[in-house]
Amino acid sequence: MPKNYIAQRIGKEFKNGMYANLGIGIPTLSADYIPEGVEVFLQSENGALLFGPKPQRGMSNPDLSNAGTEPITMLPGGSLFDINASFAMIRGGHIDMTVLGALEVDQHGNLASWKIPGKCLSGMGGAMDLLYGCKKVIAALTHTDKYGHSKIKKQCALPLTGAHVVDMIITDKAVFSVTGEGIILDELAPGVTVTEIIDLTEADIINIDDWKNNEK
Amino acid sequence: MTKQIRPEEAVKMIKNGSTVMIGGFLGAAVPLLMIDQLAESDIKEITLITIGAGYRGGGVDIGKLILNRQIKKIICSHVGTDPNLISQIVNNEIEMDLSPMGTFVERVRAGGAGLGAVVTPVGLGTEVEKMAEKITIDGNDFLLHKPIRAEIAIVKAYRADSLGNLQYSGIYSSNPVMATAADLVIAEVDELVEIGDILPEQVGTPGIYVDYIVPGHSSKKRQEIYEALWIATNKL
């Protein structure tokens, strides 16, 4: 499953002692892949820090859930606070890393996720604040859409959620770093070839010649 | 003076065309009983101020007000969880005032705290620039957003005493800030307790902000309601 692979790969980015906020979907799934021995403080934008797994049935606090309205438990040392404090934490640069889904990203580090004009509208929710305020931003998405078109663009066509904000892109095919000059291919997913990445990626990849030479 | 009233009395304070703020977060920590009162009433043309839409899928909590077409305008940061709401917005049946979530909650705070505006860098380089005024301070660009206030706020807390002091359990979410930003504040709580039972350091919203207390579902009843919902939607 591409989604599980992406979640598993995100798992490697968690570092000990890190404060992280995970978006709904694949990013939330990545919490299952936090490496053993690595302690991560998960933040939920509705106002919780250091939350843990789901409760047992019959044991839940009906008013305690994550940003996806899924029941959670609090771990020892965790804290609860109002939403203004939560967004001050996010916007004020106190969160080390966020992982967010996207409809598309581009080689300039732009990310689009909240609106497809004329088709779909979700609103930005907390995503714009997270993209602005978190020290490291990882975009997690499948490499292509259901028609096989690249979601890693030269320039986003959809309305942006954040401009020049993405540091790293993790897909089911590859991992990229975003620099001021463009994107760098860091890793291929198991079984993926350089030719395949070139075919499936619209964005220019700065170091693609190095990869081609290595493959020869 | 007692602040306690019955839900049927509380809902009468809301009129056609009222601006109503409802606390919670995408279906969580919401005043379920007061929302049901509102959904059963024939109050229409409401301007609803909420952080986002209701529980995913729609038709639950504030999603009932959408299904009943009681909402004229929504001021929020997210609508993606309720397909009925999205279709009414797309068909121009509901007007929408959208801002990023962190900005939205600060707009409400400004409304309650006597501030003139929220000035934030979030949203620069996006369509949010069209929803605000761009200003420059010390050479840096920011977006200026106006405060938000309501005629009536309905918030949800765990316990209240007769002075209106509120204690929260679980996520506070948007409830504390909304309790500061309306002409009239109604708090729905699981339990009413004696003065002194909520220790000063446990007070999440001081009674000064709260006009009326409505006894809501008990914590046990809320647990039954939410666990049934979570189980039905594969979340528990």
Image: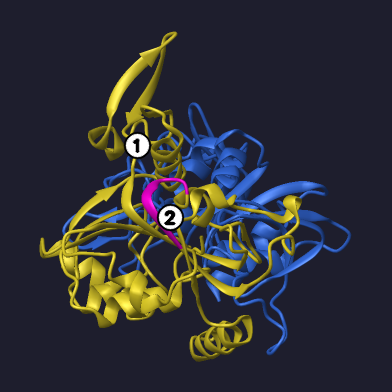
Chain colours: A blue, B yellow
- Vertical relation: B12 (above or below) B129: below
Element marked by disc 1:
loop
- Horizontal placement of A7 versus B182: left or right? right
Magenta-span inclusion, residue A202: no
Report the residue at 60% width, 48% height from top: A98
Q: Which mark is residue A198?
A: none
Element marked by disc 2:
loop
Q: Which mark is residue B147?
A: 1
Q: Residue A216's x, y, as percent? A: 60, 49
* Residue where numbered disc 2 is placed: A102
Query: How packed is label 1: few (under 14 Cα within 10 Å), some, or many (20 or more)?
Result: many
**Labels 1 & 2 near each other (Cβ < 8 A):** no
Q: Residue B193's x, y, as percent? A: 66, 70
Magenta-span inclusion, residue B184: yes
Type of the residue with mark 1: Pro
Which residue is situated farthest in the right direction here?
A37
Type of the residue with mark 2: Ala
Q: What residue range appears in magenta? A: B180-186
Question: What predominant SS class does the magenta segment belong to?
Answer: strand
| Image quadrant containing the C terminus of chain B | bottom right
Which residue is situated farthest in the front direction here?
B1
Query: How packed is label 2: few (under 14 Cα within 10 Å), some, or many (20 or more)?
Result: some
Q: Name the foreground residue: B26 vs A90.
A: B26
Q: Residue B133's x, y, as percent? A: 27, 26
Q: Residue A43's x, y, as percent? A: 66, 54
